[in-house]
Amino acid sequence: MKVMLRMNDAGDLVVYVAKKDLEEIVVKQTDGNEGKILTLANGWELEFRDLPGPENLPQTVEAKRLA
């Protein structure tokens, strides 16, 4: 699924999923088998193969939903 990553005014990483009209703050980052796994405030876990650095945000990237 395509998601948009951005930093909010408080400096938190935020994920926006347009198809679900969902915007959540990232509460945890871990390393997964194929890249980074971001855990959102609502409990979703998304895996990213190529996670851009904070200096390259906002950016739309491909993510895989794990949970």
Image (cartoon, helix red, strand yellow):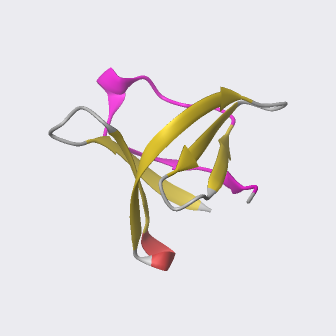
Q: Is residue 54 left or right of residue 35?
A: left
Q: Looking at the picture, does residue 49 appear above or below residue 59?
A: above
Q: Looking at the picture, does residue 54 appear above or below residue 2?
A: above
Residue 63: percent from left, percent from top: 63, 51
Work out whether residue 52 or residue 7 is closer to the camera in this orientation and state it. Answer: 7
The residue located at (35%, 25%) in the rendering is: 54
Q: Looking at the picture, does residue 63 appear above or below residue 19?
A: above
The residue located at (72%, 30%) in the rendering is: 35
Q: Which residues are magenta?
A: 49-66
Work out whether residue 54 or residue 62 is closer to the camera in this orientation and state it. Answer: 54
The residue located at (60%, 50%) in the rendering is: 62
Quadrant in the picture for the C terminus: bottom right
Residue 59: percent from left, percent from top: 38, 43
Q: Is residue 3 left or right of residue 11?
A: right
The residue located at (14%, 39%) in the rendering is: 9
Question: In the current view of this chain or complex, which residue is farthest to the bottom?
Answer: 20
Decide whether residue 51 is among the magenta residues: yes
Decide whether residue 53 is among the magenta residues: yes
